[in-house]
Amino acid sequence: MPSDLSPLLMALAWPALATLLALVTYGVTTLQVGRARAAHRVRPPATHGPEAFERVLRVQLNTLEQLVFFLPSLWLAALFHNPRLAAALGFVWVGARIAYAIGYSRAVEQRAPGFVIGLFTSVVLLALALKGVIDLLI
């Protein structure tokens, strides 16, 4: 690895770790859907079944939907604002998604805190990225 890239790579290692943890979180939600399919006898490609199955499926689908907003915001904030702050917010997002998954799998009413914290974190990352890009351009 060229030495002139080392400081940049070191700075980006934290957002990279947040990204990997986000992907592992998504992978776990995918495995949970497989387990719920077996437990509730919902054969693919069916997406309807008992409410308990549908809640687990919604966790996985919503996590995928949120990744589309979160990951670009994380990396743009890391590159154009502050990689450590972006990574810290990324870790909060992962924790929020875990809380969302646990809450929603228990009861629909318990999904809100994790969802709101995760979405808020993504919005903050987007705002930081936007500020960093605009500051660079003007």
Image (spheres, helix red, strand yellow):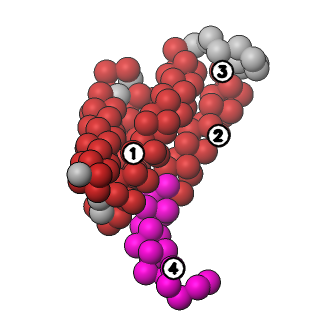
- Where does the N terminus fall, quadrant-wise? bottom right
N-terminal of the two: label 1 or label 4? 4
Q: Quadrant of residue 7?
A: bottom left
What residue appears at the point 53 percent right and 88 percent down from the top-left corner? 3
Question: Between residues 57 and 37, which one lies in front from this camera angle?
Answer: 57
User: Label 3 vs label 4: CA separation?
Assistant: 51 Å
Q: Label 4 neighbourhood size at 10 Å, few (<14), some (14-19), many (20+)?
A: few
Q: Amino acid at mark 3?
A: His
Q: Nearer the viewer, mark 3 or mark 2?
A: 2
Magenta residues span 1-19
Q: Residue type at mark 4?
A: Leu
Residue at figure coordinates x 62%, y 12% from the top left: 49
Amino acid at dot 2: Leu
User: Is residue 90 found left or right of 44 in the rendered image?
Assistant: left
Depth check: give the residue in front, 86 or 33. 86
Q: Could you tell me which secondary element the residue under label 2 belongs to? A: helix
Going by the numbered disc 1, the residue's amino acid type is: Ser
Residue 125 rendering spot, x and y as whole percentages: 31, 47
- Earlier residue among tags 2 and 4: 4
**Is residue 71 visible in this depiction of the protein?**
yes
Label 2, on which residue? Answer: 31
* Residue under numbered circle 3: 40
The residue pinned by badge 1 equals 73
How many numbered discs sit on the rendered protein?
A: 4
In the rendered structure, are the residues bearing label 3 and label 4 in contact, judged by CB atoms less than 8 Å apart?
Answer: no
The residue beneath circle 4 is 5
